[in-house]
Amino acid sequence: ATVLKKYTKGYGLWAYRNYRQSEIFNGSFLLGLEGWSIEKNGEGTVGIDEDGFLLLSGRSKNSTLMIHQGLKQLPEKSCDNGNTNMEVCFKYRMKSSGSDLFIIWDRKKVNVPIEFSDQWTGKCVRVPSLTPNKWYPIGFLTEGEASVNIDNIEASCHTHRMYINDAGNHKISTCGDGIIKLNKLLN
């Protein structure tokens, strides 16, 4: 605080709070389908719709559409709690009530239901731990006459927590508490 008081007229603080570093490339599809592989059986389309979101749209009861990319299973030392439990988070909306949407991990369906929602809905799912440092396909699968938008896909196993320490090097519980204490020291 002494240095700030003496040499500045104030300060600015910018940082992410509880930032999760995603291992997914192009999870918001800003680069189109770059980095993603597509597999189609039956009639349907996989692409970016007019609003810039991923669209998986099956056109028959026998359609299966899959989009995936390689993801490295991170080792214990890289993950929170010393385990290899990775989490996939994404936003989705379904355009038809007969939509079946699944997360794919190692080319298998993850056994977690994804409920129908015609509004944007966030979902986070833990995927089974596999052999660390190996690459596995991760992505999404639709079956039947599904029409689904997906966006903001992330996969991680670590959250960077943002903390500030006080002058005695004691952790302050939140950034907000630290800013209040620093402001008091500057007065």
Image (tube, rainbow, N blue to C red):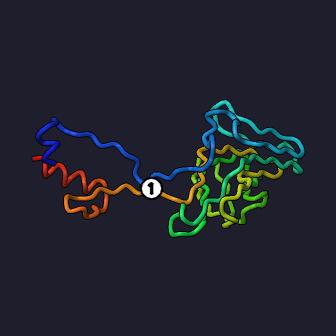
Can residue 175 be seen here? The reply is yes
Please give left or right for residue 162 compared with residue 99 in the image: left
Q: Identify the residue shown where x is 66% and y is 55%.
A: 72
Q: Please report the residue visible at 72 percent of the width from the left and 58 percent of the height from the top.
A: 105
At mark 1, the secondary structure is strand
181 and 98: which one is in front? Answer: 181
Which image quadrant for residue 29?
Answer: top right
Residue farthest along the top direction in this orientation: 50
Query: On the image, numbered disc 1 is attached to which residue?
Result: 160
Image location (x, y in percent) of residue 87: 60, 60
Q: Is residue 123 left or right of residue 139?
A: left
Q: Nearer the viewer, residue 40 or 158?
A: 158
Query: Which residue is depicted at the point 90% across and 44% down?
Result: 42
| Local crowd size for mark 1, using a 10 Å CA cut-off: few (<14), some (14–19), many (≥20) | few
Q: Is residue 177 left or right of residue 2?
A: right
- Tell me, yes or no, if residue 102 can be seen here: no
- Residue 8 image position (x, y, % from top left): 16, 36
Residue lying farthest to the bottom in this orientation: 82
Considering depth in this image, is 144 or 166 the residue closer to the camera? 166
- The amino acid type of the residue labelled 1 equals His
Q: Residue at x 71, y 53 (%)?
A: 138
Give the x, y percent position of residue 147. Answer: 74, 44
Question: Residue 52, image x and y in percent?
Answer: 63, 33
